[in-house]
Image (spheres, rainbow, N blue to C red):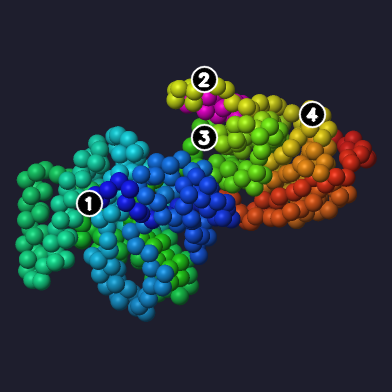
Amino acid sequence: MMQELDQAVTIGATVPTGFEHTAAEEVQEKLEATARVSKNRGRIYFDITTDKLLKVHQLKSLDNLFVVVKEYDDYQFKTTKEEVQMDWEELAAKLPWTNALAVWKLNNSIKKKKGCRKRTNPTKSDQCGNVGTKSTDTVPSDPEELWEDLEALEVKRNQRDVSSQPENDSEEEKHSEIQNQESGVTPLKFRVTCNRAGDKHCFTSNDAARDFGGAVQEFFQWKADMTKFDVEVLLNIHNNEVVVGIALTVESLHRRNITHFGPTTLRSTLAYGMLRLCKPQVSDVIVDPMCGTGAIPLEGVMEWQNSFFLAGDNNGTAVSRSVNNIKHILKRTHDGGSSSGLPLDIVQWDLCNLPMRSSSVDIIITDMPFGKRMGSKKKNWELYPLCLREMARVCKPGTGKAVLLTQDKKCFLKALSQMEGLWRKLHTVWVNVGGLHAGVFVLKRTAVVFGPTSVDVMECP
């Protein structure tokens, strides 16, 4: 198995779509590794030594992690399902599993996860490409205890590779099975998840997961289980690009700071990506006027503790959820030995009449109502212009910035055009938010002086 803790491996990660380059910047900054963006949006890859695996889990831009078993930049798929199925069977037997499985083992020890590995309420997309049937067998209390069985299988694989006599393979397999029965070792449980993109394949994601999963099961003699699995094998296909990996996360890392969710809680990874677009500096005053459950300011105070964050919402329930999430973070930091507080305040306010002095804020960052689950498209036509004007009032002229997320692009751009030169759009990052095509608009507060108009005295809808 892996002999040295500093052996080089390739890590793959899913990231919020549209923030691939932002995530790559964080990898370079914190791991000193160069990340490459996949052709398939929402994924990046980077090479590290295994002694940095814990640091990878601490990155804020990444949703799910996996260790790459093998990458194929131009995999030549056959033209019939039968031929492709045979290819999957051959591929499973010749892949270099050893180092990836060693990283999987090391990852388990780093996470120090004891007890059963649970995956509650798998999503439809998760189930789409799974192989296997549900098993009533109990999951071993600690997957690391099964490593002896895994090593025995790897020894069997190496012996089979160097053997020139096919009949010896069956003898080795029988011997391994007898040993397992005698020792009472429970086989690992696994599932295969396939993510496929491209219109030139003669197979579906289900076909690939089923056929490849069957080949993996035959090779390792593992048990297939779609919910209580120990190992999740990933098969990512984008046109002719194929990546086989082993998952290192059971649950997405974006849930790290939120315990009290609302109807439209923003993913922490997306919130962090928006914050990086702001480039917060020491002593900056950063405001989220529509904070919801506090995802953005919570990410901010955890990463930029030398800035001050002020957040609020007009909904009392949302403010309560934010306060509870802050208490959770404070408890976690105190349990970790830190006695300091957080540079963050939460207020209930009217976002069109913010209780702040003019020109007092460095950065405004928020997730605006899309008009879908919260608010309505009709109300947005009234709300957006008023919000943008109030943001322009409190933001510092000439230096202030705003990073605003919305799916109601037409309404936002129309409202922006009515701001009489108070804001200048720098660029837009297009993202996927729960299946909706949304934009993160980066604005610069111009030097134009804010002055009262008939619009400014209107009440917020």
Q: Which amino acid lies under the numbered mark 4 shown in the image of this protein?
A: Met
Q: Is residue 435 visible?
A: no
Magenta-highlighted stretch: main secondary structure?
Answer: helix
Distance from Cα at disc 1 to Cα at disc 3: 35 Å
- When the figure is inspected, residue 115 is found, relative to residue 66, above or below; the finding is above
Q: Residues within 10 Å of mark 3 (few under 14, many from 20)?
A: some
- Give me the disc on residue 356: 4
Badge 2 element? loop
Report the quarter where the C terminus lies.
top right
Q: Which amino acid lies under the numbered mark 3 shown in the image of this protein?
A: Asn
Distance from Cα at disc 3 to Cα at disc 2: 18 Å
Residue named by callout 2: 339
The residue shown at (17%, 48%) is 149
Badge 1 element? loop
Q: Position of residue 77 (x, y in %)?
A: 37, 75
The residues colored magenta run 318-332
Query: Mark 4 or mark 1, which has the lower sequence index?
Result: 1
Q: Position of residue 216 (x, y in %)?
A: 25, 60
Q: Nearer the viewer, mark 3 or mark 2?
A: 2
